Image (cartoon, grey):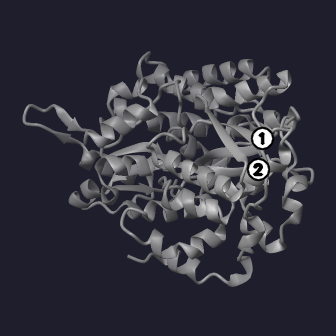
Amino acid sequence: MTTIWSRRLRCAGSAGLLILAASLPVSGAMAETIRMWTFLNPAGNAPREKALAEIIAKFEAANPGAKIVVEPQVWDQMTPKFLAASRGGNAPDVIWVITDLLGDAIKSGSMADLRKLFIDKWTKEQVADYAGAYWDQCAINGKQYCLFTSRNYISVIYRADLLKEAGIDPATLTTWDKFTEAAKKLTVKDASGTITRWGFGQGFSEAQADPQMMIPATLAEQGTIFEENGRARFATPAGVAALKLQTDMITKEGVTPKQAATWTPDDLIEQFAAGRLAMYTGASVRVSSVQAKIGADKVGQMLWPGNGKKPHSPAVMAGWAVGVWSGSKNQELAGRFLEYMTGPEGDAIWVTVGGQAPTLGTTIKSLASYFDKPGNGYMTVTTEGARDFGWLAPIDFGVGGYRQALNKAAQNVVVNGMEPKAALEEAEKEFNRRNNR
């Protein structure tokens, strides 16, 4: 079914159209190898891995002699490892930097200015096609240090078939009370009273920590979770109420299992795919992988409920800021590959093969019919959410560890019986200590 959003996108004017040829790689003889660090393995079978493999193959075919060598890394260790390698003079030519540590990477001088490499050659229309919060995040003092790919919108993933069966329209869940009632309705017990399906899955593990529902709830009230100097702003009245809302799903409402205290994002996907969760906190970049397990038409993504003043709370947005190492001896070719990977052809591959939300406005227009297909609606939901209801962590100071600190606070409430305010005060102290603030 054609959505109002997709029709609006199709009707957009042509002013933002890219001159495609300007961003395509230039053929020519060369014999250069580009090393790239990413968490993706192009030899793998996940949708994003297949997309990366296709992008690399097409780039190499158009650039005889060029070789892109991917050295897969552990995602949450990759950026600190890159910063250490940069100091040691042995970093990869192309690096994927995690959002939490982007400010540190830029301030360290480890990332080259992409304007000098290729952006200054773009038309105004090309630059406008990238406009938005992600572009702005990489633009500092007239320099552009990165371009984002694998853009991530973290909100609620749901079983479309189960919500339909229960008569729940996800678009109507615009308050926390409505969301809680829906989670109760979706929680199922067997004849003995044992819960066989939980309405809402959460994961408070400190390993590979995704941001949980307390962050959107807090952001809806106070707009940020940090002070201007980078110190944590967790233990506020809004933060305390949000953590209580999150943990009450276990201790009071009974729609989230207590195992959430140790669950990781992978655990949530496993439980969801097995039919033991009707909804869970999850990342848009992994929806396509989940759909591959249980069917594209069964998986959807919704925006977070609002606070009664606005229909939706801000979701944490993330993604990977891809840049060129400032110490690379092959900056020109590395820049050309980065330009192609994030440009029109690469963006279309990320969408259609990798199942990722589009980066470029022109991609949204050109693939409008694709977004209307069953199972692809989550891409327009997350694109709209990124435009109207998204939040990117600041990069003026490092925020590494904030998600882990808040997940630890939730553990302390659920497992150790701490009061939310005390748990958040402890989280503030730990975050500030780790970041010398």
Q: Residue 196's spot in the image, x, y percent?
A: 19, 36
Location of residue 374 by image quarter: bottom left
Give the residue drawn at x 84%, y 45%. Answer: 331
Instruction: Tell which residue pokes out farthest to the left in this image.
Output: 191
> Number of callouts in the render?
2
Task: Give the answer, above or below, for where 328 lies relative to 207.
Answer: below
Residue 230 visible: yes
The quadrant of the picture occupied by the C terminus is top right
Which of the two residues, 179 or 422, is positioned nearer the viewer here? 179
Q: Is residue 82 left or right of residue 222?
A: right
Q: Residues within 10 Å of mark 2 (few under 14, many from 20)?
A: many
Q: Position of residue 132 (x, y in %)?
A: 72, 61
The answer to the question of whether label 2 and label 1 lie on touching residues, with beta carbons closer than 8 A, is yes
x, y percentage for residue 91? 78, 30
Mark 2, residue position:
137
Estimate the spatial distance between the alpha carbons at disc 2 and disc 1, rounded to whole Å: 8 Å
In what element is the residue under mark 2? helix
Q: Amino acid at mark 1?
A: Ile
**Image-based side of 308 in relation to 252, left or right:** right
13 to 30, vertically: above or below: below
Label disc, if present, on residue 395 of the rendered structure: 1
Helix, strand or loop under label 1: loop
